[in-house]
Amino acid sequence: MSANGNLNLENANVKKRGGKHYVMIYTRYERFWHWSQALLIFTLFFTGLGLHGTHTMLDFRTAVVIHTYAALVLIVLWVFTTFWNFTTGQWRQYLFKEGVFKVIRFYAYGILVGEPHPYRKGLQRKQNALQSLAYMGFMIFIGPALWASGIVYLTYDLWSGYSWAGTGLMLIAFVHTAAAFIMGAFVIIHVYMTTTGKTPTHYIKTMISGYDNIELTEAEEAYIRETHAVAMKDD
Amino acid sequence: MLLLNRLNLFSRVVLSVSVLSFATLAAQANEEAKPAGAAVDSDMNFRIVTDTKPSIRDDGESTADHSKFEVLQGPFEDGPSVTKACLSCHTEAGRHFMKSIHWTWEYDHPTTGQKLGKKTLINTFCTNAKGNEGMCAQCNAGYGWKDESFDFTNQSNIDCLVCHDRSGGYYKTPNSAGNKACSVMFEGKQPIQWDKVAQSVGLPGRENCGACHFYGGGGDGVKHGDLDSSLKRPDRKLDVHMDAEGLNFACTTCHVTRQHLWAGSRYNVMAHDTEGLGLPGERRDVATCESCHSEAPHPKTELVGIKLNGHVDKIACQTCHIPTIARGGVATKTDWDWRTAGKTKNGEGYKEKEYTQANGEHRATYKSIKGSFKYGENLVPYYDWFDGQMVYTTIETQFDPASGPVEINGFKGDADDGVSRIWPFKRMHTVQPYDKGNNTMVYMHLWGEDDDAYWGNYDFGRAIKAGMERNSIPYSGEYDFVETYSFWPITHMVAPKEDAISCDECHSKQGRLDGLDGFYMPGRDSFSWLDILGYLVLGGALLGVLLHGLLRKLFSKKYPHGEES
C-alpha cells in the first residue's frame, strides 16, 4: 500500500464522517516512551547547559554523572522504541503527509481567527502533516546528531591516542552543542504547541490518559467493537 | 604488631622529650649568640633545623648493625676518614657514586644536548653556584669543594654521611669561610661526633635528602614549594605517602635507586609513563605515579572512575592530586627582586622579616645580601602542557631582554604532540642581573673572602665582573636587570584522594586551566558565535511562542475558538 493510496482512502473516510468517540490513540507504551523521553531530554538539556558552562547550578562531576546515565537510558529507550515502531507499524505515522502548508497557514493565521484545524485526527493519523515532518526531522537529524556525537564522546578513550583526537573532540563538542540548541528550540515550540488544543491543557491530558475524542469511520468503529483492538471509553 | 606500636610510642615519647630539650638548648644558644654580635644577624644560616631527631624509616631491622663494625669504632677526626672506612667494605660504592649527579653536579641532556647541572647553570635564586662553591657546594655530596681545585676523582672526598647518617647528628657547613658578614653562620653548633654518626648509618630518611632538597634556593621551602621541612614528619593531609603515622614513605621509596643513581630527573622528566606497573618485579627506572598506581588508577567499575582514567592521557596525576603547594606551614618564595639588594644601615647589611608563615616563623622580606622577596602558601600551581623536556637558558644563551621574562628553564609541550600532559609547576618570578651588552645572563661572585664578593661589598658591578672573569665568560662590562621565570614541576605533597581537586576547578570559566589554549575543554570552552546563535535560537523560539500566545489571547475575544479535534 502506497502512502498516496493510504491518503486517498483516508480522505475518502473523512468525507464519510462517523461519530466521535473517546478512543485510546496513545497506547501505554507510547505514553511511557513520550514522558520518559521528555524527562530524559529535560534532564539532559539542564545538565548539558551546566556542562557547557551556561549555568553553575550543578557541580561538574554531578552533571557529568547525571548527563551520562540519562544519555545511556535514552539510548536504550530509543533502541527499544525503534524496535517498537517497526514491529507495530507505527513508524508510518511519521511519513510525509500532504497539507503541510495548510497547517502552517493555520498556525500562522487560521488559529487566530477561529478557523477549524485543517487536519482531522484519526485512528491511523495521530499527527498532522507539520507534526509528522517535525518529528521526522527530530528523528533523522536532531536526535542522531546528538546521540552519535554523544556516543563518540563517551568512547573518547578508544580514540584519544590519535593525533586528531584534540580536533575530533572539538568537532564533537560543536555538533553536540549545535544540535542541543536546536533541540532546545524544538522543545520550546513543542511544549507551546500543546496549548493550542481545545483548551490549553487538552493535548497534555490526552498524552497522559491516552484517550482523545476523535471521529471514527463506521468501519473503524465496527472494527473496534468487533475486536476490542483499541480501547474505547464512551459506551 | 604490638611491639611495633610500643616502639612507635616509645619513639614518640623520646621525640617529644628531645624536642623539648633541644628547644631549651637552642634558646640558650641564641642567648649566647646575642651578646657576641648584637648588630650582626644571628641567623645567616639558611638552614635552621630545630628538630634534629631523625625520621623513622620503616624498613625493618637491617642485616648489619654498623655500630658493631670494628672499622667504624674510630676515632675519626673528619668526614673523609669516615668515608675511607665506609669504602673499605662498600668497595664499589665510590665508583658508583661518582657517576651520580649528587657528586658531579653535571648533566648532559640526552635529547637537547645541553650541558646542565648546578656546576654551570644559572638559576633564579642566588643566580649561580659557579664560582660560589664555597657556600653552594655544601649541598654537593662531597667534602671541601670550594673552587676549581676540588678533586672529583678522590673517593675520600665523597660525603657518605649527609645521606646515610641516621642519628641526626651530622650537618654540613660551607666549604669556605666567606666574608665576615657571613661568618656567624654556624656559631653555636655542637661539634659533630664522628664516631657516633659513622656507626649510625642506614638507608636515608626524609631529613637526609631534605637537608639539601628542603632548603634549595637558600632557605626552607624557598625553591620548590612542594619540598620543605614540613615533609620531615608530614601528616596524611600534607602528603598521603610520606604521612609519618601512615605509609611513611622515605624519598627512596619512589626515587628508586640502582647503583647510587636515582630515578626522577628534573632535567629530563618522564611526563607521561605509558609503561605503568612493572610487573612482576618492581621497576627500578622511574619515580612515576604510574609505576605503582598503573595507567588507569581510578575504579573501572564506576562512571566517574572511568571518566577520570580517561584523563590520564592528558593530565598528570599531580595536577589533580596536589591541590596546592606549600601547605605544610612553610612558605615558598614566589618573587625575588635583586634590584633592591645592597641597602645598609650604618654600613651593615640588615633584614626585614615581615612575612609570618603558617607555622609561626617569620620570613625575611628583605635582605641586603639578596634583595626583596615575596612568599606564598597554599599556592595554586601554575599549569601548562609539558613533555618532560626542560630547555635551559644557560650562561651562553643569548636572549632578547625586551621580549618578556627570560625563562631560565623553559619547557616544551603541546596539547597535540601525543606526549605532553598538563602538569603543575611552581613558577618563580625573579628580577636579576644580566649582561646588558651581550644579552646573556651573568655569573655573580657572591661568596668569598675577597673584596670582590657581593656578600661583603654590595657592589653588583664588581661582583659580576669578577664572576664573569674568573669563569672566563665574555662580559660587556655593563649590567642591568631582567625579569626571569623558573618552573619547578610539582610532584610532592600529594593529598589524600578525598582532597583531590574537584572537576569544576578546571571545567569552569576562570578555572585553574583558564590560561591554556589549543584544546577544547567542556565547561570552560564554547564556540562564541555558535553560543550567540544558539541562545538567539532559544530566545527566538521562546519569544515567538509568547508572541503567538499573546496574539491568540487577543484574537480569541474577537473570534471564538474553532471546533478542534
Image (tube, coloured by chain):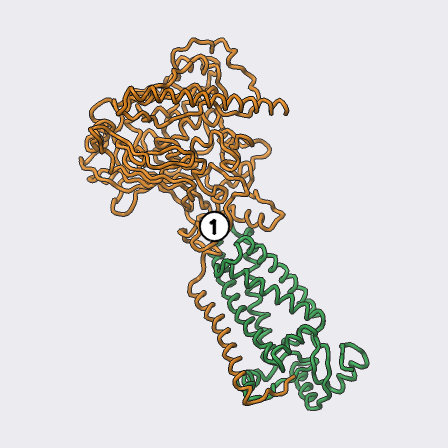
- Outermost left residue: B477
Residue at the spot x=56%, y=89% of the render? B559
Residue at the spot x=48%, y=21% of the render? B18
- Outermost bottom residue: A15
- Give amino acid for label 1: Glu
Residue at the spot x=36%, y=36% of the render? B113
Residue at the spot x=21%, y=26% of the render? B452
Q: Is residue A104 or residue A158 the one in the foreground? A: A104
Q: Element type at marker 1? A: helix
For disc 1, the neighbor class at 10 Å (few under 14, some 14 to 19, many from 20) is: some
Q: Is residue B535 or residue B410 the one in the foreground? A: B535
> In screen coordinates, is A148 left or right of B439?
right
Q: Which x, y percent locates residue A19? A: 73, 87
Q: Which x, y percent locates residue B230? A: 45, 32
Q: Is residue B85 or residue B192 the one in the foreground? A: B192
Which chain appears green?
A
> Dividing the image into 4 quarters, which one contains the C terminus of chain B?
bottom right
Q: Is residue B510 above or below residue B23?
A: below
Query: Which residue in the protein does label 1 denote?
Result: B505
Colour assignment, chain B: orange
Q: Is residue A13 above or below residue A135?
A: below
Q: Is residue B157 above or below residue B530?
A: above
Q: Which x, y percent locates residue B335? A: 33, 40
Q: Is residue B464 above or below residue B21?
A: below
* Chain hosting mark 1: B
Q: Which x, y percent locates residue B294? A: 56, 40
